[in-house]
Image (tube, rainbow, N blue to C red):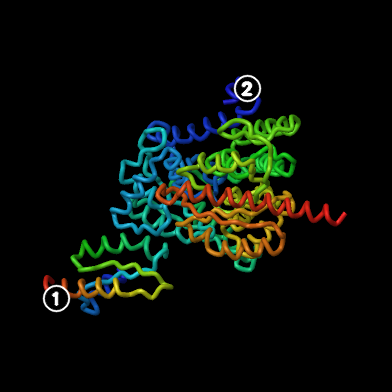
Amino acid sequence: MYLLGTVKERKAEGVIFAAPSFCDPALLERPMLTDRMREHDIPHISFKYAENSGQMQPVREQAGTFADSIKLWS
Amino acid sequence: MSAKIEALDVQKDSSMLMQKEMINSNYDALTDTANNGKKVCSTFVPGNLNELIQSFGMLNNLPETNAIQNAMRQESGGMIQTAERMGHSEDVCTYVKADIGMMSKGNIAPNGKPMPNPDLLLLSYTGCFTFMKWFELLRQEYKCETVMLQVPYQGDGEITQNMRDFVVKQLKEEVIPALERVSGNKFDIDKLRENMRRSAKAEDDLVWVLESAKNKPSPIDAYFGAIYYLGPIFTAFRGTQQAVDYYKVLRQEIEQRIKNGQGPITPGGSMGKEKYRIVMEGPPNWTNFREFWKMFYDEGAVVVASTYTKVGGVYDQGFRHDADNPLESLADYCLGCYTNRNLPKRVDMLENYVKEYEADGLLINSIKSCNSFSAGQLMMMQEIEKRTGVPGAFVETDLVDPRYFSAANVKNRLESYFQMIEQRRQGQSNMIASAR
């Protein structure tokens, strides 16, 4: 509810779920949250990153693709 | 049941047969609720309130035990992959994914019959944050009544009166009313007391069995073998007469083994000469349980004490269910579980085990997907080495995901570790000889 409210209030065009690897609380609730996004046709993408490696290139690429997909198809 | 017990050969294997029969009987009762009319309460092993649940005539279903059963039958791998296809990360607790996968495959119990939907989700939260998210996922699926018992973490390494009062208050105001609503039965404190009296009896015998490993040779394996011994008390039988009978028979078996100077019974028969006495930290791997165990008994290594066998209660530290103070005692039980203890307390416990059981080493089985257990284990190992002088070692596996059990790697590490203990021993005896 909070997330759906925030999307509406801020007029967001998409939601990024970013979670550190091995973070059970964030990773386990993600399927529940993405199900709600799907039900409401809100574009979304999920990332996972290693907290200690600082290797953000894959995340940068995925975020760019996600932004492009919103621009092109939303 | 009792007639069958008498009919069994009261040597060696009768306790194992009894244990198997008990666990199967609980699955039969669970999958027959359409006929027996019983209500089902899903809850977790650490901090389970079995005496209370049974006092309402309800059955107890433990999702992590189902995952273990599926792993031992080599079925958890497919279930985990199903959950991953549903969007669950490869990094998270594999018990959760095995459970989610089992649900999506028709929720078939180990007896081959469909498991009923729970009537109540009772989350007794003891030191594992994942439990909370796991039950959120189950609540979404089953949409049944959910009640949460918040158990404060022993951050300062002790149970205070405030913590105890907080848990008792929740039992009175949240948990018992929910059990009354769902079961349709009024709370009967005398029934609870009766169950707790039986629990304490079984706990006395269990502790005797676990402490029998102080003998040389140890008559039991206190990790692999003890998993079987703990089945009844960790699952649906604590507080029942069946558990009292089971632990009595088990104790008699072990007494006999001590008299005969025998070591543990392994899947490969009676164990040979005891060469290494090991203390284990961390849960076992379930998908390759027997293979893992074989790597120990083939080398003459026996586990004399383990912490995993304390996740469902730390009875060897003196705790007993107390019928005279039932709710306070249930609170102490939940607060005292191994997973609810802070790192310094866990280190103290391991140090005592190494010393009291005269162990040759500490071995940690670090679980890839269990952060609650694994965080801090390297520090724990170093601290134990410093305090006791015995060598520590680390192997990495997983709970129920077969992809993370690399038999060759684990075997290599164990063999090197046992050789190292042998060399140290040799070095020490050489030193003693040259000092003479």
Q: Is residue B356 above or below residue B202?
A: below
Q: Is residue B178 above or below residue A37?
A: above
State which quarter of the image contains the N terminus of chain B: top right
Q: How many marks?
A: 2
Seen as rendered, the residue at the extreme right is B436
Residue B205: x and y in percent read: 69, 39
Residue B41: x and y in percent read: 45, 46
Say which of B239 and B290 sits in front: B290
Give neighbour class at mark 2: few <14, some 14-19, many 20+ (Cα, 10 Å): few
Q: Residue at x 49, y 57 (%)?
A: B174
State which quarter of the image contains the C terminus of chain B: bottom right
Dot 1 falls on a residue whose secondary structure is helix
Q: Residue at x 57, y 59 (%)?
A: B340
Residue B388: x and y in percent read: 72, 59
Disc 1 sits on a residue from what chain? A
Seen as rendered, the residue at the extreme bottom is A10
Q: From mark 1 to mark 2, how far is it between C-alphas?
A: 75 Å
Say which of B71 and B261 sits in front: B261
Dot 2 falls on a residue whose secondary structure is loop
> Going by the image, does B76 lie left or right of B319?
left
Numbered circle sitting on residue B5: none
* Amino acid carrying mark 1 in the image: Lys
- Residue B183 can be seen in this image: no
- Residue B216 can be seen in this image: yes
Say which of B304 and B336 sits in front: B304
Residue B36 sits in quarter:
top left
Numbered circle sitting on residue B9: 2
| Residue placed under numbered mark 1 in the picture | A71
Residue B350: x and y in percent read: 66, 56
